[in-house]
Amino acid sequence: MKPTVLRIARVIRAPREKVFAAWTEPASLQKWWGPGATTCTQAEVDLREGGAYRLANLDPDGKVIWISGTFVKIAPPEELAYTWLVSNLPGESTLVRVAFFEHAQGTELVLTHERFAAEAVREMHAQGWNACIDKLEAFLARADQAWPTLDEPGTPA
């Protein structure tokens, strides 16, 4: 079966430094990470190339699913790349790349998740990633309503 790739692009109404920090700081991750009703009860991040991360996803049914991997590339606030392994999915790790581009309305986040062995797994991750990014947007909207880069004249509010 040919591997598949997932690509999601979204504009987040926050400066990329804030978006990058929310994506990489354990305390922030615990406030927004997890699709839907899933919450992040534990986040460990060794933010350096070769460093590991581990996230505990607590599902509403009480089951904990661990997501873990190793950072391959870190270029704050522009890019992250890391391996991705989900504890309840058999198989090898996949690769996640997240780019943070400056945008007139904040940050264009481009997530590329590759090396899926099956279309069904890719689709499951598409739903999960989109739900997580929805929660990231809501978290950043609550976290700080008056960033100077968004309040400058001529910048859409």
Image (tube, rainbow, N blue to C red):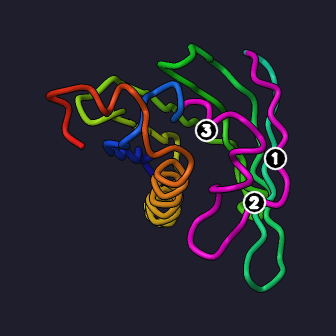
Sequence order check: which comes first, mark 1 or mark 3?
3
Residue 12: x, y in percent? 37, 43
The residue type indicated by label 1 comes to Ala
- SS category of the residue bearing label 1: strand
The residue type indicated by label 3 comes to Trp
- SS category of the residue bearing label 2: strand
Residue at the outermost bottom position? 61
Alpha carbon distance from label 3 to label 2: 13 Å
Residue at the image point whose x is 33% and y is 33% from the top: 106
Residue of label 1: 43
Q: Quadrant of residue 51?
A: top right
Q: Is residue 115 visible?
A: yes
Residue of label 2: 40
Residue at the image point whose x is 83% and y is 69% from the top: 64
Residue 88: x, y in percent? 76, 65
Relative to 115, residue 128 above or below: below
Labelled disc at residue 23? 3
Q: Residues within 10 Å of mark 3 (few under 14, many from 20)?
A: some
Q: Residues within 10 Å of mark 1 (few under 14, many from 20)?
A: many
Magenta range is 20-48
Residue at the image point whose x is 44% and y is 59% from the top: 130
